Image: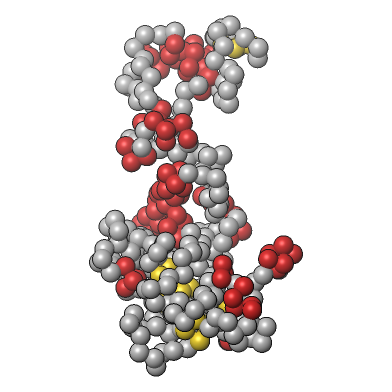
Amino acid sequence: GVDTGFMIIKPSADEFENIVDSYLNTPYDPVSGWDGQGYNNFKGGLGLSGFLAYYFANHSGYVPIDRCTYAHTADEDCLGTLPFQNRKATTMLKDVCGNPRNCPYSHPLWADDKKDACAQLHRQYFTYRNIFEEKYFSKENKQERIGLFKQNSFLGYCTGPGQSNLLSMTGVVVPKAGWQTICPTDACPDDSYMRPDCTCTDPFHPCSACPDGTTCQTYPTLMCIDCNCAFCDNYSSQCCEDNASVETSAGGNVCQAVAGRDPKCDMSNNFFPAFNGSSDICSSEIQLSRSTVPNGCGCKPTSHSPCNYSQDWGDSSAKCFICTADDLAQGD
């Protein structure tokens, strides 16, 4: 059918009347379609999408344009034939990337190019919302972009997954925490990240995007992690000990791996705790080698939003926890 979201038609009063007359007088059958020629076996076949497909096929002067160029939806068919950055226009479909107002997760089976394309579509949606609010929205107390969920996609308008976590334009305003920084939506250049002061990092020094009190991991993905948080043994002793006074080659480290003290620390290697041996897990020699920030213990810089994190979100007992396979299986 015809994508009625994007059409290029030379204005003509006569042609408009012809289209209206044909629409009113062309017979339609649920089985045989428009005038017995079909054009009805798709969504919108009974409406303009189906009728215009029939009309354009039976009237000269109309040339179909490439869907992927002028109505790219970030679907696999288009991504396989046309890189997303080469599109002229886009169409957002909720069954392809998800409705941005639902603050959706990226599907785990999506390829990287689709994840990037969907992130761009969602970011574009919220960029337009931000422009509208700044230029035309007259509400005195506007909602600030305080959401930390997928900031690169949702620009701070989502506090978590699901529609209930969307920060609404007209709903109750959720206040900004004192430690949080809100920056303009202008993106930093490629290979650069937003600093806490809303400036952009040098491409060769990404760790300057990390806020005070966090340690920078550069591989396999850039993360800012509070090493005095999360991983503990059976006695609530952290698997990561403070070594701020110790001279280290990396400089600025605040944690020392404590492997071998208790089996819990050794068994939790896949969850960012101590590595076996005497090296420092916060140093450049042994990095954490994971791509997800431990829950509540850090943040990820992006090119669109600063990495916001407060060391004061809880006391040591709240920050100290053990997560095992049994916990995950039981949903704890």
Locate residue 188 relative to residue 59 in the image: left or right.
Answer: left
| Furthest residue toward right | 330
Relative to the observer, which residue lies in front, 234 or 139? 234
Which residue appears at 67% of the width and 83% of the height? 234
Residue located 48% across and 44% down the image: 111
Is residue 277 at all visible to an observer of this figure? yes
Q: Is residue 297 visible?
A: no
In the rendered image, residue 238, in percent from the top left (x then y), is placed at 57, 84
Give the side of residue 235 with respect to residue 9, left or right.
Answer: right
Looking at the picture, how far across and down is residue 81, in whole percent? 39, 30
Q: Give the answer, above or below, for where 332 lies relative to 250.
A: above
Left or right of 153 on screen, residue 316:
right
Left or right: residue 36 versus residue 299 is right
| Residue ID at (66%, 87%) | 235
Work out whether residue 192 or residue 13 is closer to the camera in this orientation and state it. 192
Q: With respect to residue 3, does 266 lie above or below? A: below
Q: Nearer the viewer, residue 184 or 318?
A: 318
**Which quadrant is the C terminus positioned in?**
bottom right
Name which residue lies at 56% across and 67% down: 270
Residue 239, located in which quarter of the rendered image?
Answer: bottom right
Judge whether 181 appears above or below 43 on screen: below
The spot of residue 208 in percent (x, y) is 32, 73
| Residue 226 screen position, x and y as percent | 47, 78
Q: Residue 277 or 204: which is nearer the viewer?
A: 277
Pick out the residue farthest to the bottom: 245
Q: Quadrant of residue 218?
A: bottom left
